[in-house]
């Protein structure tokens, strides 16, 4: 179906800023020094948290997903071989105190001007379901797979891909 | 015939892996480090090889069965064991995060430095008094420097004391003293004779670090990207392993020992975003194959065909006892003083010192590397290797007891 193909190629050409969730106030965000219990309370409702240096600058420093919490929530079992720096982060042993203790430091992100196709490729490459959108280190939005699916499906149902109004 | 020899090595490797896993598991069940089990597996297998598999023929009635020969010194086995060392250092490097290292607290650095200097000096002095050459004494001193934190972490977990000041200081300190130990090893392996050499090797190490780490950090993304563009299964892993081997080659060429190259390769790739992707594969290869071969080989090398009589055993026994005592006192004093200088209480300083006692992988690697590099030869090599093995066993068994004692009634 040529029409379908046209649709997806238009979709690919859109910019991250056009499809991202711009409602930064509504994104799960936490400052790196905040208590681990605050992390748990947010993750009870959301799947991930963006960790920023502080709530004013919103400079992205890490991300916490459910999976990160699984490794500190479950009892720690050290492998029988321990070389180098063992990972001893654990709620049971009190070695995780703040958000920065549990977050992943290495962040894969995209910038607002990047095309959706590049963002999708990056999600495939790194096996991610969400990307933070970063403008000069500052978190300006997020692009989730969930959202992209919804937008694309909406477009196949003749809804406009890009909403005119904000939010 | 080459092929028969090769298949003998393969059979030996199979036996080594089975012995390593069985005894490793046994020790794990006894709540002891699996590595000790693997070394003992090596001692057992080495004995078996010597008495049953060194070219004997079994004659049952008229049938002659020639048993396979097991030779731990064969080129094939040695290569695999050397790869085991490289994998160990590579994994250590992968798991060492530079950013965390930078954040290490003052107390940990003090503890690490004290814990390197005092055992090094005490060990060296003791050996000189026991009539070893300067070179041998330096190697022994070096063997005493690096802490193996695995045992301590496990004990502290049982005691729920990981989150104490002493606990976190020990963890930080053990990581730094590993790095210091590796760099010092590069020095010792590189220095041939004079003091001039020391400076020259120092320069070489700095140059090597600069070129291979800093330049590598710039290029690694491009290289790994390339690896990813080749759409072949595990291309990224292959490229990483190639980097490990190339780095080892150049480090060896630079005269600072291949294992430094392996460590730097690990550090470098560990900084990359995608390192977590290969971690499991590298561990599967290392832990599942090469590393047990190395530990079994270490155990087996206890059996050497030199003229050993009662007096030489007595010499070794006395030497081992002295060195083990020095190693324990050295860490308690060195790390304890470091902790005290960093402002910890007497009790905490003692806890830190005791927690840093265990020695394991790096001590064995240093001894093995020194022997294969020809720094230790003949009876002295044998003597020091036995002592190192005993040192690892005694310190890892003794440390938990001491740690529990010092942490008792801890608030």
Image (tube, grey):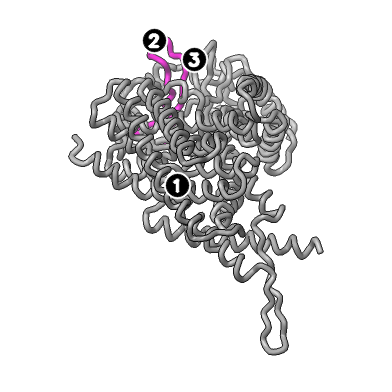
Comparing A96 with A28, the one in front is A96
Q: Chain of mark 3?
A: A
Residue at the disc numbered 1: B319
**x and y percentages locating residue B335 in the rendered image:** 36, 30
Nearer-the-camera pick, B339 or B374: B374
Give the residue displayed 18% in from the left and 34% down from the top: B411
Whether B269 is drawn above or below B295: the answer is above
Q: Residues within 10 Å of mark 3 (few under 14, many from 20)?
A: many
Q: What kind of element bears circle 3?
A: strand
| Mark sitting on residue A127 | none
User: From the viewer's perspective, is B202 left or right of A167?
Assistant: right
**Mark 3 lies on residue:** A140
Residue B214, quarter of picture: top right
| Residue at point 49%, 23% (across, down) | B99
Instruction: Name the chain under label 2.
Output: A
Foreground mark, 2 or 1? 1
SS assignment at label 2 = loop
Residues behind callouts 2 and 1 on a single chain: no
Q: Which residue is mark 2?
A: A56
Residue B277 in which image quadrant: top right
- Disc 3 from disc 1: Cα separation: 66 Å
Is-magenta flag for residue A56? Answer: yes
Residue B39 spot, x, y in % from top left:
51, 54
**Residue B308 location, quadrant:** bottom right
Please report the bounds of the magenta region as a residue range: A44-67
Could you give the CA–CA distance between mark 3 and mark 2, rounded to whole angstroms?
Answer: 12 Å
Quadrant the N terminus of chain B occupies? bottom right
């Amino acid at each position: 179906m040529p029409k379908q193909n046209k649709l997806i190629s238009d979709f690919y050409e859109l910019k991250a800023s056009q499809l991202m969730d711009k409602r930064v106030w509504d994104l799960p965000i936490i400052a790196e020094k905040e208590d681990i219990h605050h992390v748990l309370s947010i993750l009870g409702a959301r799947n991930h948290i963006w960790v920023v240096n502080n709530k004013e600058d919103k400079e992205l420093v890490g991300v916490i997903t459910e999976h990160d919490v699984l490794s500190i929530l479950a009892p720690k079992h050290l492998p029988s071989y321990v070389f180098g720096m063992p990972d001893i982060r654990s709620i049971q042993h009190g070695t995780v105190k703040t958000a920065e203790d549990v977050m992943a430091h290495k962040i894969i992100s995209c910038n607002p001007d990047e095309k959706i196709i590049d963002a999708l490729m990056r999600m495939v490459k790194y096996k991610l379901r969400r990307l933070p959108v970063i403008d000069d280190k500052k978190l300006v939005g997020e692009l989730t797979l969930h959202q992209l699916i919804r937008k694309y499906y909406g477009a196949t149902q003749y809804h406009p891909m890009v909403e005119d109004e904000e939010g | 015939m080459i092929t028969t020899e090769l298949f003998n090595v393969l059979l030996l490797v199979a036996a080594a892996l089975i012995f390593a896993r069985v005894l490793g598991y046994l020790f794990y069940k006894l709540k002891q480090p699996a590595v000790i089990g693997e070394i003992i597996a090596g001692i057992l297998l080495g004995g078996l090889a010597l008495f049953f598999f060194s070219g004997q023929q079994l004659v049952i009635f008229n049938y002659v069965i020639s048993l396979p020969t097991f030779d731990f010194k064969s080129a094939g086995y040695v290569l695999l064991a050397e790869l085991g060392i490289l994998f160990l250092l590579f994994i250590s490097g992968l798991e060492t995060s530079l950013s965390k290292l930078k954040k290490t607290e003052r107390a940990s650095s003090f503890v690490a430095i004290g814990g390197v200097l005092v055992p090094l000096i005490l060990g060296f002095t003791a050996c000189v008094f026991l009539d070893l050459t300067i070179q041998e004494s330096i190697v022994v001193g070096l063997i005493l420097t690096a802490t193996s934190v695995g045992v301590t972490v496990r004990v502290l977990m049982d005691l729920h004391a990981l989150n104490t000041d002493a606990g976190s200081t020990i963890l930080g300190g053990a990581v730094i003293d590993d790095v210091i130990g590796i760099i010092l090893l590069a020095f010792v392996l590189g220095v041939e004779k004079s003091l001039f050499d020391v400076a020259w090797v120092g320069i070489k190490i700095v140059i090597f670090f600069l070129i291979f780490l800093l330049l590598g950090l710039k290029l690694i993304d491009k290289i790994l990207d390339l690896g990813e563009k080749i759409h072949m299964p595990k291309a990224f892993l292959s490229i990483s392993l190639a980097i490990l081997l190339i780095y080892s080659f150049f480090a060896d060429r630079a005269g600072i020992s291949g294992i430094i190259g392996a460590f730097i390769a690990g550090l470098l790739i560990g900084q990359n975003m995608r390192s977590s992707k290969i971690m499991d594969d590298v561990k599967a290869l290392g832990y599942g194959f090469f590393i047990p071969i190395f530990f079994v080989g270490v155990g087996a090398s206890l059996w050497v065909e030199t003229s050993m009589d009662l007096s030489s055993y007595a010499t070794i026994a006395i030497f081992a006892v002295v060195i083990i005592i020095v190693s324990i006192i050295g860490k308690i004093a060195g790390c304890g003083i470091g902790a005290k200088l960093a402002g910890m209480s007497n009790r905490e300083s003692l806890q830190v010192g005791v927690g840093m006692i265990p020695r394991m992988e790096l001590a064995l690697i240093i001894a093995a590397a020194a022997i294969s590099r020809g720094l230790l030869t003949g009876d002295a090599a044998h003597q020091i290797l036995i002592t190192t093995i005993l040192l690892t066993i005694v310190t890892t068994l003794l440390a938990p007891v001491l740690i529990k004692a010092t942490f008792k009634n801890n608030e």
